[in-house]
Amino acid sequence: MLTIKSLNQFYGGSHILWDVDMTVPTGSCTCLMGRNGMGKTTLLKCIMGLLPTVSGELLYDDTDLRKISADRRARLGVGYVPQGREIFSQLTVEENLRIGLSASRGKLKEIPEQIFTMFPVLKKMLRRRGGDLSGGQQQQLAIGRAMVLEPKLLILDEPTEGIQPNIVHEIGDIILRLNKEANLTVLLVEQKLPFARRVASEFRIIDKGRIVAADRIAGLTDDLVRHHLTV
Ligand SMILES: Nc1ncnc2c1ncn2[C@@H]1O[C@H](COP(=O)(O)OP(=O)(O)OP(=O)(O)O)[C@@H](O)[C@H]1O
């Protein structure tokens, strides 16, 4: 379980995250929702150690994440797929996957076969450059790269952003399989309501840097949507 308590974050003088309390239960697919600029990406970056936090607690099971570096968080089993995917377009699919492997500090030498079972297209395109892949294939590569360290918690920032509508469903299938078949706990930032309702078991809403609602996905009422999500 990931437990966040009273977390505060600032960019210079701007107070962005305000006493954030949130849990991501083990085995859940928890969707973090909110309008643009409310602090979703900032919160994910704090969890990953890519941004400093000023105060609060970040517990992953019994480990205090604030005390360990970003790469140790990755080795501990927290995988991250950033917004915009950030794959290397000039490198091949294999080289992109090996970059994920390098964070293991030599402990893992080979790309786990499980990645290719989950994403057969990556095996087929191993020698192609990342930039030659379609948006949906690039998203699979970004997820595959995060999966090479065999995480237990996978954090995805808007995985359907910029993806063709007919491929969005496929990305949803992948997340459902990771959650239900590979038993990964998932924390997902997502703005598309039908997608969130389909894949998530829990939701949290962030509004102006504060968590304002948290429940099972069935509790995501039209009222909450109107107040905190519609633009
Ligand atoms: N590097 C930065 N320096 C200063 N302010 C920043 C920086 N990055 C983000 N912000 C501000 O922090 C706030 C939260 O941004 P964040 O990207 O976390 O929001 P978000 O909910 O992920 O939005 P989006 O859905 O647009 O990605 C916004 O007001 C944003 O302008």
Image (spheres, grey):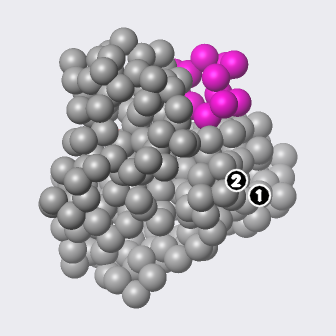
- Queried whether the magenta region covers residue 160, the answer comes back as yes
Q: Where in the figure is residue 191, as x and y percent of width and height? A: 61, 38
In the image, residue 115 above or below residue 162: below
Residue 223 magenta: no
Residue occupying image coordinates x 23% and y 68%: 72
Q: Could you say which is closer to the camera, residue 175 or residue 6? A: 175
Disc 2 secondary structure class: loop
Disc 1 is placed on an element classified as: helix
Asked where in the image residue 150 lies, by quadrant, the reply is bottom left
Identify the residue at horizontal 61%, vertical 46% (top origin).
Answer: 175
Residue type of the residue flagged with mark 2:
Ala
Seen from the viewer's position, the closer of residues 2 and 170 is 170
In which quadrant will I find the C terminus?
A: top right
Disc with the residue nearer the chain's start (2 vs 1): 2
Residue 219, quarter of the rendered image: bottom right
Neighbourhood count class around disc 1 (C-alpha, 10 Å): few under 14, some 14–19, many 20 upward: some
Q: Amino acid at mark 1?
A: Ile
Task: Establish if 133 lies above or below 95.
Answer: above
Instruction: Report which residue position mark 2 lands on.
Output: 200
Residue 183 at x, y percent in the picture: 61, 64
On the question of residue 20 being in view, the answer is: yes
Q: Nearer the viewer, mark 2 or mark 1?
A: 2
Cβ of disc 1 within 8 Å of ligand 1? no
- The residue where tag 1 is placed is 217
Q: Is residue 222 above or below residue 93?
A: below
Q: Are marks 2 and 1 in contact (CB under 8 Å)?
A: yes
Q: CA distance from mark 2 to mark 1?
A: 6 Å
